[in-house]
Amino acid sequence: MIHKAIRGTKDIYGESIDKFDYIIKQAEETFKDKGYRHIITPTFEHTSLFQRGIGEGTDIVEKEMYTFYDRGDRQITLRPEGTASIVRSYIENNFFATEEISKFYYYGPMFRYERPQTGRYREFYQVGLECMGSNSYILDAEVIYTAFSFLKKCNIVDIEILINSVGCPKCRTKYREVLKSYIKERLDNLCNDCKVRYEKNPLRVLDCKVDSCKKEMKEAPNLLEYLCDDCNTHFEGVKKYLDMFEVPYKVDNRLVRGLDYYTNTVFEIVTDRLGAQGTILAGGRYNNLIEEIGGKSVPAIGFAAGVERVSMLLENFDNDNRFDIYVAWMDEDVKEYTFNIINKLRQNNIKVTFEYEKKSVKAQMKKAAINSKNVIIIGSEEKESGLLALKDLDKREQEKLTINEIINKFRK
Ligand code: HAM
């Protein structure tokens, strides 16, 4: 039997892994600059954490989790997202007692049983951050600015930032009722999913992608008009500081997220270059989640980007992974001399490759052309004179240099 990767999963190698590594590096640099520290949490947790955290009525919890019983009869779920685990860790490790503000960033695989298609997988990677300890709207704006800066650092500029406020439980309860009576009159014309949503999570009807639902919801009451004074002040503050951070954004009063934990600010960064999977990054504030999971009442906010989706947008990606120098050697007499040269080059951080076994010069030159920027060929003449011909394979130029001159050249 030939084994194949499971549907919705993939091997990441070659140019794809170069892009992955590049994206993670840009994220780490951007996040660390704002005071975030790396955290690694387990890839599986007790199922109840996600049920409570993400919400019983959500698509993720109802239809998409990889849940099983382990050999100790514990109900386990492969994490579908990172936020719930980080909140669990924040509570369990008592961060609240030791620091006023906690800032974490993370990356790793997430698992959701969704219908696979371009940009949508069953195992996919997220890179994201979470900040616990402040309810300031300046933080909301800074978090969105950080998301924007990360994508800008990856040279991804063809994007739109959508923001909205879903208020607090108090104003949302009021809005829910108004929305429900609006939907009730149109229920027959909505898709089957929305009929269920109407009962469980009517706000989700607002962002249904089915045309008939979109049409029916066109005149739906505006969530922003139902915000209480505190939530309204908060949202005005977020917008003001986004302007001050010079972050371009658009208010989208239909933006509601698929996870239940959000309060106040929610946001998504979207592109029209990826078809149906256009959301590359998403997040928001979750001021009640820490308490709901068993901790103190601590406000928090965060986001996560889909690494595969960011990767699909990478352009002008500097993918020159070639070695600086390929060192070819002609015969056994110069083998040790060649090895000393290689050693010196490597000690000076020059990226060098060579053959372990003797090969013809022609075969070595062929390999050099594929994987290196420069080549040196070492024979008895070079060994005696100490002068090495360094050939630039792109420019097709050659110069004779001593080993120290070569080291100096690459140092520059
Ligand atoms: P989310 O919107 O479920 O939010 O996922 C965030 C991002 O992960 C999406 O915008 C998308 O780019 C990527 N993503 C989601 N599902 C898939 C999939 N099946 N295949 C490929 N990429 C996918 C969260 O997960 C929240 N935890 C974000 C957050 C952090 N909110 C506050 N803090």
Image: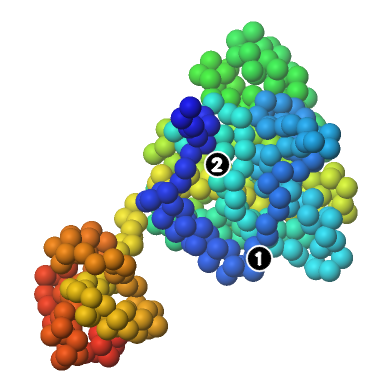
Left or right side of 58 for 317: left
Image coords of residue 84 (percent x, y): 74, 46
Residue lying farthest to the top in this orientation:
188
Precedes in sequence: disc 1 or disc 2: 1
Q: Give the number of callouts.
A: 2
Q: Amino acid at mark 1?
A: Arg
Residue count near mark 2 (Cα–Cα under 10 Å), binned few <14, some 14–19, many ≥20: many
Q: Which mark is residue 124?
A: 2
For the C terminus, the image quarter is bottom left
Snapshot quadrant of residue 400: bottom left
* Residue 405 sits in quarter: bottom left
Q: Residue at 77% across / 51% down in the picture? A: 87
Confirm or reject: label 2 Cβ below 8 Å from ligand 1. Answer: yes
Q: Is residue 387 visible?
A: yes
Q: What is the x, y in percent for residue 100?
A: 80, 67
Q: Nearer the viewer, residue 196 or 166?
A: 196
Task: Determine the residue located farthest toward the front in the rendered image.
Answer: 332
Name the residue carrying label 1. 37
Residue 307 spot, x, y in % from top left: 51, 48
State whether residue 227 appears in this view. Answer: no
